[in-house]
């Protein structure tokens, strides 16, 4: 536990004022120094005539088998490495604590397990109900209806967590899973889910005094307890706010707009008012990017549930934000994926680990610590942008890559299958092919015999010359592989999430229409 506790403060949710921006390749240019015209109606769109296939895709029999094996390995972890008391998946192999974010992925993966025949519907229903009952039964695990990040075996705030924080991002990931399971199973699971959703007061987490007017009115990163021994009594909102259109931050705002209780609901301004800034790369094009983190997971977490592939291009100007560029968020993430592919193929540091089929720097385990590899584009000048208001101040923007010795996590490229299916499958085959000197698999344990598929991360670049492989699996890395592969194959997770009544109502408030609805 001591080793794990040291890692909690550098997990993925540590990106406060994350930041994202957009622009269309042909209109804005793709080279350094490209500018957005004043008063721009710039957009990241799928350009006319572009050869874009949208998911779900048709895969060859061999590729479909590989993808199903990867999904099954991740599902084995999410189904079997769980608290016997609550049914909730443990955050990682070596820990006895639960991340509510991991539970969100778990709840969404359970219906996938039923549909793929890995468990029965009765088993899935029972587990989902057990998890939701456990969350509801312990009122001390939440504040204003949002949850502490780390829980123990009794669904209480974990006493040995690094800090006792109610996390808006991790709660959003949990609620996305609650919505998915509720829509799939119905019955008592829907009843429990409705109670959880109704209790979530997103408005209580709006910053009213963030120390700077530009950040007032955005959702705080969370709420910290004053006394860890009595965590729900006294505390305050964190000063960091989710002011930029990062992937997780859009999910938070989206769910806030979809809140079924009008008194707890955020206005569409919370979603469309998120700052959007522009970056570019010659092999990726102009896109919205997150100056506070260039980790690849920031391009796909929300896509586990929100069907951006079939929502088209949004329009912030229609909601009072004409300086915010219009974006097709599926296309935007596809461009970020291709930036990662290109930079890892260029491999300027000459890492043995990286190459055309070994790419995607993201948050993952590293030797002795949790690491966040990052790759970023060249910023695009935005003449009308006001620092702090429309984009972060220049002093906050750092485009230097963070290679961390070339450490890769298979989930990063694998989850990108929903954007670039052929490239992602090639990467997964590459990871499966890696061997130790004795010929045994470096990263893979066979799911057919109960194995959990890929280990979390690895590198071939070590002082000893021997590969390094993480000992653990991590729930929030296993989870997106199950869900995004499923969306690439069938769109089933999207169908469950997007048809929930709360989500359909929220789409109407945001003036978003899903293809076919």
Image (cartoon, grey):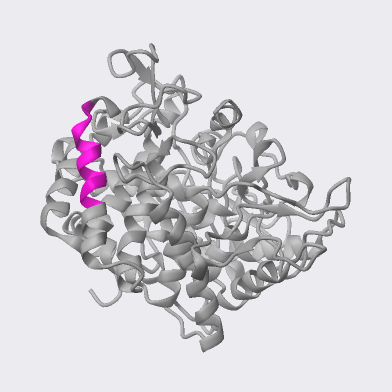
Residue 494 lies, in percent from the top left, at: 33, 66
Query: Is 510 left, or right, of 237 in this rendering?
Result: left
Query: Is 124 left, or right, of 228 in this rendering?
Result: left
Quadrant housing the C terminus: bottom left
Provide the residue span drawn in magenta: 128-139
Measured along the vertical axis of the image, is residue 88 above or below residue 4?
below
Quadrant housing the N terminus: top right
Q: Is residue 41 visible?
A: no
Measured along the vertical axis of the image, is residue 298 above or below residue 311?
above
Residue 361 lies, in percent from the top left, at: 66, 53
Residue shown at 58% from the left, 33% from the top? 10
Residue shown at 42% from the left, 39% from the top? 99
Q: Main secondary structure of the magenta part?
A: helix
Q: Is residue 192 visible?
A: yes
Query: Is 233 left, or right, of 458 in this rendering?
Result: left
Magenta-colored stretch includes residue 462 = no
Residue shown at 43% from the left, 77% from the top? 489
Measured along the vertical axis of the image, is residue 49 above or below residue 445?
below
Name which quarter of the figure residue 436 lies in. bottom right
Residue closer to the observer: 266 or 182: 182
Residue closer to the observer: 386 or 204: 204
Residue 437 lies, in percent from the top left, at: 82, 63
Residue shown at 30% from the left, 68% from the top? 114
């Amino acid at each position: 536990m001591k080793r794990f506790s040291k890692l909690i403060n550098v997990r993925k949710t540590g990106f406060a004022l994350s930041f994202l921006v957009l622009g269309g390749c042909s209109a804005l240019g793709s080279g350094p120094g490209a500018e957005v015209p004043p008063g721009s109606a710039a957009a990241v769109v799928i350009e006319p005539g572009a050869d874009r296939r949208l998911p779900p895709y048709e895969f060859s029999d061999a590729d479909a088998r590989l993808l199903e094996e990867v999904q099954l390995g991740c599902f084995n972890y999410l189904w079997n490495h769980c608290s016997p008391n609550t049914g909730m998946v443990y955050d990682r192999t070596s820990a006895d604590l639960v991340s509510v974010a991991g539970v969100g992925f778990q709840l969404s993966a359970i219906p996938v397990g039923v549909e793929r025949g890995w468990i029965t519907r009765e088993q899935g229903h029972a587990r989902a109900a057990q998890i939701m009952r456990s969350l509801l039964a312990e009122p001390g695990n939440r504040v204003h209806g949002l949850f502490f990040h780390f829980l123990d075996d009794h669904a209480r705030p974990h006493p040995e967590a690094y800090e006792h924080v109610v996390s808006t991002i991790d709660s959003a990931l949990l609620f996305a899973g609650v919505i998915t399971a509720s829509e799939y199973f119905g019955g008592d699971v829907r009843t429990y889910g409705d109670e959880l959703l109704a209790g979530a007061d997103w408005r209580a987490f709006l910053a009213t005094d963030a120390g700077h007017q530009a950040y007032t009115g955005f959702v705080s990163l969370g709420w910290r307890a004053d006394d860890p021994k009595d965590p729900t009594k006294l505390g305050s909102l964190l000063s960091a706010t989710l002011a930029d259109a990062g992937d997780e931050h859009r999910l938070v705002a989206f769910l806030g707009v979809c809140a079924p209780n009008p008194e707890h609901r955020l206005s569409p301004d919370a979603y469309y008012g998120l700052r959007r800034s522009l970056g570019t790369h010659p092999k990726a094009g102009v896109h919205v990017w997150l100056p506070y983190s260039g980790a690849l997971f920031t391009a796909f977490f929300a896509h586990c549930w929100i069907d951006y592939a079939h929502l088209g291009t949004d329009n912030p100007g229609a909601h009072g934000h004409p300086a915010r560029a219009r974006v097709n968020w599926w296309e935007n993430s596809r461009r970020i994926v291709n930036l990662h592919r290109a930079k890892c193929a260029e491999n300027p540091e000459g890492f043995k680990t990286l190459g055309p089929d070994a790419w995607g720097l993201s948050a993952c385990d590293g030797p002795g610590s949790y690491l966040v590899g990052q790759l970023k584009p060249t910023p695009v000048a935005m003449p009308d942008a006001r620092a702090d208001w429309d984009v972060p101040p220049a002093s906050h923007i750092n485009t230097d890559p963070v290679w961390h010795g070339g450490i890769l996590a298979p989930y990063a490229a694998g989850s990108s299958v929903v954007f670039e299916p052929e490239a992602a499958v090639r990467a997964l085959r590459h990871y499966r092919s890696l061997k130790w000197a004795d010929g045994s698999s470096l990263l893979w344990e066979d799911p057919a015999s109960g194995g959990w598929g890929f280990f979390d991360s690895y590198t071939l670049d070590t002082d000893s010359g021997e590969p390094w492989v993480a000992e653990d699996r991590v729930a929030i890395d296993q989870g997106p592989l199950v869900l995004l592969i499923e969306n690439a194959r069938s769109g089933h997770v999207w169908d469950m999430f997007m048809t929930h009544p709360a989500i359909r109502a929220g789409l109407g408030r945001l003036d978003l229409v899903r293809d076919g609805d």
